[in-house]
Image (cartoon, rainbow, N blue to C red):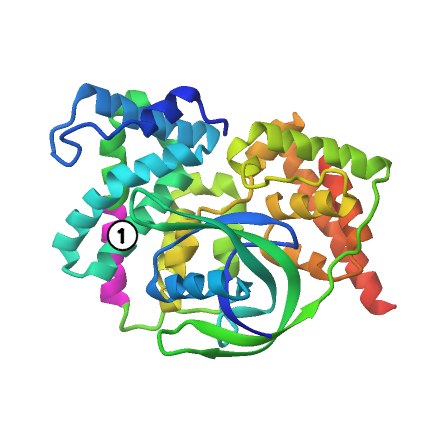
Amino acid sequence: MQLAIFPLPIFLLPNGVTRLRIFEQRYIRMVKEAVQGDGFALSLYQEDNEFGTSGWATWVKIIDFETLPDGLLSIDIQGQSMMKIDEVWYEEDKLRRGNLSLIPHWSPEVHSEDTLDICDELKRVFEHNPQYSELYREPHFESATWVCQRWLEILPIENQEKAQFIQPNSFNQAKHFLNNIILG
Amino acid sequence: MQVTNSVMAKRDKTPPKGRYQSSMSKDDSKQLTEWLVAVAEKRDKKAFSALFSWFAPKIKNVAYRQFNNEAQALEIVQDTMTNVWRKAHLYHPEKGAATTWIYTVMRNVAFDALRKIQAKKEDLLSDDIWPLVEGEVTETESFSDYLMDKRLLNLVDTLPDNQQQIVRAVYFQDMTQEQLAKLLNIPLGTVKSRLRLALAKLRQQLDDQSQD
C-alpha cells in the first residue's frame, strides 16, 4: 500500500486518537490527499534513519478537522492498524511517501481482574481530562486491548520504550508493565 | 487540566478591540494571566490555544522585523509557544505580567536562533539528538534546569529538515509524571520509581526472550 509518511514523536496504536496542528505546505497537501484517499502513515521520528522514519508506522485516518482562529489546520487522526515501512522516498516538496504493509497488533482481549483496575484508572484519566476524552466519541472501556493501548500512549515514558509494545504478541507484557506502574 | 467555564466563556467571546495595539487593557492582562496559569496548572490546551492566537501574530511581526525571513519568523513563533507550554509552571503571576514573561521567552528563543544561524557553518548534528529531545519531554522536572534546557533547545534547533516545526505544533499528548502522580494519588517519587522498575523488568523480560 502506498501512503504519505509523517514522522512525529507520537506513539499511536490502533484506535488511538490524537490531534495535530498542520501548517507546513507539504503536510497540508498530505492532509488533502488523505481525506480523499486512504489516510496516511504516522511514523515515529528517528533521526539516524535516512528518511527520519522508524521501520514501522501507524496507519491513520483523519476523523475530524478544523481551521483554528490562528489560521492553522487542526486534524484529529485515529490509528487504524500497525504497518511495516518497506520503502520510503521523497517527493518534490519533501513529503515522504512509501510502500507499507499491514502488520497485526493485539487480538481483542477480555478483561481480567488487573485490567479492570487499570481500566478504572483510565476512566479517571478521561474524567479529569476533558480535552483528551473529547477526542474519543466512543471509548471502548469494555475492551482490555483498548484500555491497555490507550494507557501506553499516554504514559510518561520514552517513545522508544513504548515501541516494544507494537509487537503483536506483547499484550501480556504490556499488561504486566501497566500493572507495575499503575497499581504498584 | 480541566477547562474552567470562565476560560471557555471568555475565549468564545470576540477578541477585545485594540487586540493588536501595543496598549492593553487591564482586563486583557488579567485574561492572559489566567490563561497562562491554566496552562501551567492544568495543562489546559484551550487556554494555550487562546494564548497562541493572541501572541503568535505579535511574535511573528517582531521576529520578521528581526530576521527578515518568513520561515524563520514562524520558527520563532513555534519555539516560543512551545517553551511557553513547557515552562508555564515557572511563571509566577506575582512577579510580573504574562506578556512580559512570554516576551522574555521569545527573546531567549530569538537569541538562540541567532546563535544557531552563526553556528550553522559547523556541523552540529549528532546521532543522539532525538532521544535526548524525547527524554526531555518525559522528564518534566529537568525543564527547570536551565542548562539542560538550553542544551535541549540548541539540539532541537539543529534538527534537520524543519522536522521540529510540526513536532512543536503538536504539544505532545503524553501526560506528565506529575499528572500521573496526581491521578494515582501517590507521590511523584513513587511514580518515578515505579516507572523505573517497570522499565527494568520489561528490559529483563526482553533480554530473557532474546536468549531463548
- In this view, which residue lies farthest toward the right? B212
The picture places residue B28, in percent across and down from the top left corner, at 23, 25
- Magenta span dominant secondary structure: helix
Question: Foreground: A135 or A167?
Answer: A135
Side of A72 where A154 appears, left or right = right
For the record, the magenta segment spans: B107-119
| Image spot of residue A107 (x, y percent) | 80, 55
Horizontally, residue A170 falls left or right of residue B16, namely right
- Which residue in the protein does label 1 denote? B76
Q: Is residue B39 above or below residue B58?
A: above
Q: Is residue B25 left or right of residue A89?
A: left
What kind of residue is marked 1?
Ile
User: Which secondary structure, mark 1?
Assistant: helix
Residue B87: % across, % down: 39, 38
| Pointer 1 chain | B
Residue A179 lies, in percent from the top left, at 77, 40
Q: What residue sits 12% from the left and 33% below the top?
A: B22
